[in-house]
Image (cartoon, helix red, strand yellow):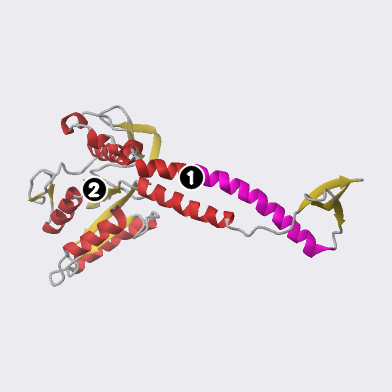
Amino acid sequence: MDKKEIIKILRDTSLDLEKILALPESDSDEILQVKTMRGKTCFFSYSKNTGKQKYIRKADKERLTSLATRYYESKLKVAAQKEKKQIDRCLETLSREPEATDITKVSEKIPEEIKKNVMLSELTDEGYARKWQLGNNVVRKYRSHKEDDYHKFKTLRGDYVGSKSELIIADRLFVRGIPYHYEIAFTPEAEVDASRPVYDQFGFIAGYEVIGFSPFDQDTLHPDFYVLNKRTRKAYFWEHLGKMDDPEYCLRNFNRFMRILDAGYVIGEDLIVTHEDKKHPLMTESIDRIIKRYLS
């Protein structure tokens, strides 16, 4: 959650508290009192002006409800007033000193050459994203993704992908600063072995080995992209189906998708899908809409 969302939540809460504080005041000076007499709960109305109290029969529901509600609202207003003061102080600080109160701004003030060598805090979006991206060094892959007979298209990031559409997706992710892995090895049915951690270059746990998993296994899948929303820290697989007019291609990918879905992954929640054929190429507008909806 970024600072703008926090400010919005605080402002909405402050407005809700104002509604409580705006509840009408009663003209009566009576307040409700509760006493225990001979083991029974008894209700009385107490007049602040006269100092007299009167017994309220439990059968007098309307009067008892009125005084009980007034008692509750008075306590509610006291608590709301205190809470609103605290929230308004937070809002004032966040609005007046954005640079000093936003930890995400700290790394922006550091020179780039220094920042490249800094272990950024995972409490910041950039720090978390960098650690997530460094996992690329330990994720086992089937290919190294240098230029070969299949990977002929060089991305802005410097790696190679297998089609022009994948190139467009990769480059639009890159220029927007969205972390991604390309064609990681993935077996949807495999189980994580928590006793076998995998470490990144800084010695931190980046993941775990998987039982029965091999990046070279014929049954291992290699989704086109694995992408991260830095703000929500939610990761998605992104599959692009580029030959929807090829029946064999469709059947092969249908079987792959069934394995992923049977393992509990959900399209639109865990899996992003784009597609095209010769008559209907992938449009950059479609990529931008997906990025805005899932990754911004």
Q: Kindly identify the amino acid type of the residue bearing the numbered disc 2.
A: Ile
In which quadrant of the rendered view does residue 274 lie?
A: bottom left
Residue visible at 77% across and 52% down? 32
Q: Which residues are magenta?
A: 60-86
Residue visible at 31% across and 56% down? 294
Q: Residue furthest bottom?
A: 279
Whether residue 172 is visible to the viewer of this picture, yes or no, is yes
Residue visible at 37% across and 55% down? 265
- Residue 159 appears left or right of 250: left
In the foreground, 228 or 48: 48
Q: Position of residue 64 (x, y in %)?
A: 79, 59
Q: Which residue is mark 2?
A: 178
Is tag 2's residue or tag 1's residue first in the polypeptide sequence?
A: 1
In the rendered image of this protein, does residue 232 appear above or below residue 135?
below
In the rendered image of this protein, does residue 197 appear above or below residue 149?
above
Decide whether residue 292 is among the magenta residues: no
In the foreground, 260 or 88: 88
In the rendered image of this protein, does residue 251 appear above or below residue 163?
below
Check contact, mark 2 vs mark 1: CB within 8 A.
no
- Residue 279 appears left or right of 53: left
Whether residue 2 is visible to the viewer of this picture, yes or no, is no
Q: Position of residue 9 (x, y in %)?
A: 44, 51
Mark 1 Cα shell of 10 Å, populated few (<14), some (14-19), many (≥20) = some
In which quadrant of the rendered view does residue 106 lie?
A: top left
Q: Kindly identify the amino acid type of the residue bearing the numbered disc 1.
A: Ile
Q: Which residue is mark 1?
A: 87
Q: Judging from the image, what secondary structure is the residue with disc 2 in? A: loop
Q: Position of residue 158 (x, y in %)?
A: 11, 43
Q: Judging from the image, what secondary structure is the residue with disc 1 in? A: helix
Number of numbered discs visible in the structure rendering: 2
